[in-house]
Image (cartoon, rainbow, N blue to C red):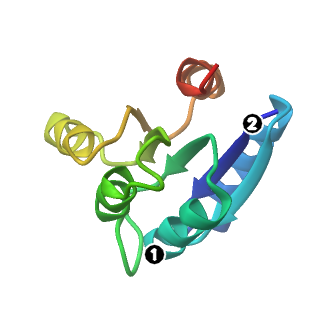
């Protein structure tokens, strides 16, 4: 069982993502903005992070960059899960250190495959 950190400021999205992660048999922890996501990543050292982009305080691009450049968390794959569907957003997200990019609305099968593809082991 892997631990997945879900970072999203929408309670309904957190619920949907948690349901999918837990249906795969994994443990889910959540954060409600980018700053809290960075702190939770350092505290819990999850196996994978699902990161929204448009959030208050620290956005998902900034949080991903912080996590991917921090020695203690740089090994954790970050998958951006966002409504931002432009190619420039995708490219920018990958430059910040993201390992994957999924656009909302979420297609369960796509998210499940992406999680499986990026979990270590």
In the rendered image, which quarter is residue 120 located in?
Answer: top right
Compared with 43, 83 (above or below) is above
Horizontal side of residue 62 vs 71, given as left or right: left
Point 38% across, 32% down: residue: 99
2 vs 1, front mark: 2
Quarter of the picture containing the N terminus is top right
Quarter of the picture containing the C terminus is top right
Image marks 2 and 1: residues in contact by CB distance under 8 Å: no
Horizontal side of residue 19 vs 111, given as left or right: right
The secondary element bearing badge 1 is classed as helix
On the image, the x and y values in percent for residue 107 come to 58, 28
On the image, the x and y values in percent for residue 112 come to 65, 24
For residue 1, which numbered disc appears in the image? none
Horizontal side of residue 25 vs 91, given as left or right: right
Q: Residues within 10 Å of mark 1 (few under 14, many from 20)?
A: many
Judging depth in this view, the residue of 34 and 40 nearest the camera is 40
Point 67% across, 66% down: residue: 11
Point 26% across, 44% down: residue: 93
On the image, the x and y values in percent for residue 104 come to 47, 41
For marks 2 and 1, the one nearer the N-term is 2
The secondary element bearing badge 2 is classed as loop
For residue 35, which numbered disc appears in the image? 1
Compared with 2, 3 (above or below) is below
On the image, the x and y values in percent for residue 2 come to 75, 36
Judging depth in this view, the residue of 67 and 95 nearest the camera is 67
């Amino acid at each position: 069982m892997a631990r997945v950190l879900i970072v999203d400021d929408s309670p309904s999205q957190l619920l949907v993502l948690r349901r999918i992660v837990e249906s795969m048999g994994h443990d889910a922890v959540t954060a409600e903005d980018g700053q809290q996501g960075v702190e939770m990543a350092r505290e819990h050292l999850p196996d994978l992070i699902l990161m929204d982009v448009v959030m208050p305080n620290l956005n998902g691009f900034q949080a991903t960059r912080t996590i991917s450049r921090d020695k203690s968390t740089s090994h954790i794959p970050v998958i951006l899960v966002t409504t931002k569907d432009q190619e420039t957003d995708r490219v920018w997200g990958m430059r910040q250190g993201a390992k994957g990019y999924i656009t909302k609305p979420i297609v369960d099968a796509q998210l499940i495959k992406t999680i499986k593809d990026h979990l270590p082991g």
